Amino acid sequence: MISVQTWSDAQRLWDFQQMHHEPRPCSVGIGLGSHDLGVADVTVSLYQRGMFPLIVFTGATSRTTHDRMPRGEAEHYQQRALELGVPVSAILVEPRARNTGENIKFTRSLLKERSIEVSSVLVVSKPYEERRAYATARQLWPTVDVVSASTAMTLSEYVDSIKDARLVLDMLVGAQQRLLIYPDQGFMTRQEVPESVTAAYERLCAGGFTSRLVPTT
């Protein structure tokens, strides 16, 4: 049973990750690979609304996806997009990235190889990683404008859709840790983190929601 305090702390991290960017037309849409096919759905919806003429799906596999997406996250995202009516000519697949930094770096390289000019990107991620995705793209691709987007869902709706509250909370904590430590490592721009968010993060760590933390020693 997850306590009321734990849910409150998770909600605080969830709210902090939301960037509340208004989608606008960009040079390219980037769907960040993950266990959540909803990222592909949102990317397709934005494409169909005319927000970008080209989609890049990026991602290999992870311990969360190697069974359910054996061909790689980007490949499965592409399949989903094709099923939803996106022409194959509007999709590029980057199949090697295994973290958010590689998602951005490898996508940037792929577009450069194809001589595709990019002045802005609309980065689509899971809802609890909007800020992480934004901060990573700003650090690793500083020459482009970055808009962040995700599925419009509440925390409780998202947990219901994934059907694994523990996984979602662990992922939330992992995303928050990276916002705190990765700026010093040059992986993302520094985000101003309210003390209340840090306190919520620390309580969740103390409560054992730590399976997605990266080692710090």
Image (cartoon, rainbow, N blue to C red):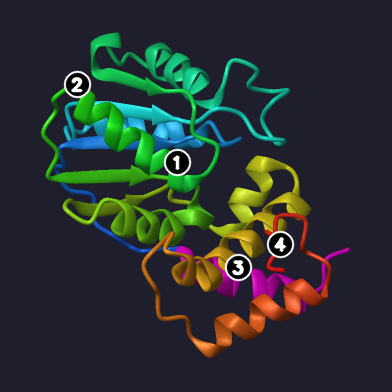
**Which numbered disc flags the more N-terminal residue, 3 or 4?**
3
Query: Could you say which disc has been placed on residue 23 in the image?
Result: none
Q: Secondary structure at mark 4?
A: loop
From the image, tell me which residue sits under label 2.
114
Proximity of marks 1 and 2: CB atoms separated by less than 8 Å? no
As rendered, which of 109 and 157 lies closer to the eye?
Answer: 109
Q: Which is nearer the N-term, disc 4 or disc 2?
A: 2
Task: Tell me where residue 112 appears, x and y as whole percent.
Answer: 20, 30
Q: Amino acid at mark 1?
A: Glu
Q: If you read the primary sequence from the N terminus, does the residue marked by circle 2 or circle 3 appear first?
A: 2
The label number, if any, that marks residue 177 in the structure image:
3
**What whole-number distance in Å separates the C-alpha atoms at marks 3 and 1?**
18 Å
Q: Quadrant of the C terminus?
A: bottom right
* Mark-to-mark CA distance, 1 and 4: 19 Å
Which amino acid type corresponds to the residue marked 2 in the rendered image?
Arg
Taking the image as shown, residue 50 lies to the left or right of residue 78, namely left
Q: Amino acid at mark 3?
A: Gln
